[in-house]
Amino acid sequence: MNLADILKKIEIKEIIGDSNIEIDNLTQDTREYFSEKTLYFAVPGTQVDGHDFIGQAIEKGSVVIVCERLPNNLDSRLKQSFSVNEKPLHGSDKVKRSDSEVVFVVVDSVSKKMGQMVSNFYGNPSEKLQIIAITGTNGKTTIATILYQSLLNLGKKTALFSTAGDFINGVEIETQKKASSSMEIIEFQKSLKQAVDSGCEYVCIEATSHALDQNRLNGTKIVGAIYTNLTQDHLDYHENFDDYAQAKQKLFSLLNIDSFALINIDDKYAAMMIEKTKAKIITYGDVDFKNPISRDILFKIENFGISGTKVLLDGNNAQVKFVGKFNMYNILSVYGALIELGFNIEEILKTLSDIDGARGRMEIVTGSREGVVGIVDYAHTSDALENVLKTLNELPHNKIITVVGAGGDRDSGKRPQMAQITQNNSDYTILTADNPRTEDLVQILNDMLAGCDSDKDNFEIISDRELAIKKAVDISTAGDIILVAGKGHEDYQIIGTTKHHFDDVEVLERYLKLKKQ
């Protein structure tokens, strides 16, 4: 593609070189593939600054550099034509090729402009799709998955990009992710193009705070957005809770007047989410929640058991395979989105009754242990744990035994809260490893232990996650519920920087099938 076409709709400060140069590859990482016609984005990141690697990018074949400042060692002819020169490159990364062979595009913010440029390169795929984005602390994956499955059931070709996997028309696809939750800008736009090429009409995506803060959705047309809730999470990345909330709010500022915003108005941060949006606002909530603000659509739980819930959705009877008030908020938001997308109520109610939900979200694990119910859930925040445990406590049961850990190299402030909530809402708690990553597991467990009431004898520490799950099964009896929380759909455990195969569902199912010694 011609560089001039990539730069459409982009406000630039200056171009040095030929804007008609041809480009066939984009990257923001010098460790990735480079062709002889590569455009390199010098993105200032949280860990490293892409400007420090401009020299490497040129040596590897970049013919275009998009940057916020020029390297200070351009040849004198080019250097004289540019007035802003703020920071030199590291010595090892100095430009060694002739700079006259390279085009420099200078913009005020690479991260803000990059989304539209990448979208242009891939033919602006979002303009050919109806994209629904879900944000909030808890519920994103569940809502995205239910909406995706519903659209497929309604006969629509649809893609899902989520923490629990990336799918196009029911088939899981391979995508390059630096984190499990969302793709970087280039991979995201490339995947949207793949969805278009596969005939998709709809795409359901999770909009994480990291993605929004890093402007990964810039250049993407979003037809609808859903807000779930906001509780403490990711304060290892965001400076404080207000920054975290502001990142979530960005999604709604991206919407235009033709978009819709479905807002859980029962959440105390709901008003903040929509104060700057141009979209049509639809509020949803629980009929039994004491909220002085009126809601557009409501749910009312009639009765439920471990296998599902009978619920009124905007006054319409529905039977769904989900339990818990938090899940009814999720179901209602999908109902509202499908209404806004033009589907009729009868079709929506029928398809919602058939949906099984996301992997590792209140997933029931079967085994031969008579009368023991196993549950695997991704709950890894105090609010999510409380929601799940309160739901389980409302079900008929003898004891609730919970196995829970906390991730390393992540927000440590939530660890004691998670342990306290688990102990208060479980009959027995086993604290164990989650993904310790490079952090000392003993420190993680000690942080959790600080939230436990040491005067009670209803908890213990078993650092090995498999042994912790085995112990939970060993001490269970008929009528008990075993909750294994924190990792959900993940089929790995990260110890140090290495991923090891580990699947909570697989392990729990295996021990449930074994006879108690």
Image (tube, rainbow, N blue to C red):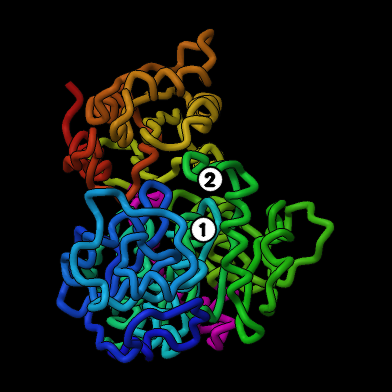
Q: Is residue 348 magenta?
A: yes
Asked if 182 appears above or below 66 in the picture, the reply is above
Instruction: Give the residue at x 15% y 77%.
Output: 36
Circle 1 sits on which residue?
213
User: Mark 2 is on which residue type?
Assistant: His
- Left or right, 38 with respect to 205, comes to left
Asked if 165 appears above or below 369 in the picture, the reply is below
Question: Start and end of the magenta stretch?
Answer: 335-364
- Residue 358: in sight, yes or no? no
For the C terminus, the quadrant is top left
Instruction: Give the residue at x 23% y 78%.
Output: 101
Q: Earlier in the sequence, mark 2 or mark 1?
A: 1
For the N terminus, the quadrant is bottom left
Circle 2 sits on which residue?
238
User: Whole-percent x and y of residue 205?
Assistant: 43, 69
User: Whole-percent x and y of residue 261?
Assistant: 63, 73
Residue in the foreground of this view, choosing between 147 and 345: 147
Image quadrant in which you'd find residue 440: top left
Marks 2/1 in contact by CB < 8 Å: the verdict is yes
- Residue 129: in sight, yes or no? yes
User: Mark 1 is on which residue type?
Assistant: Asp
| Mark 1 Cα shell of 10 Å, populated few (<14), some (14-19), many (≥20) | some
User: Whole-percent x and y of residue 55?
Assistant: 25, 61
| SS for dot 1 | helix
Residue in the foreground of this view, choosing between 320 and 298: 298
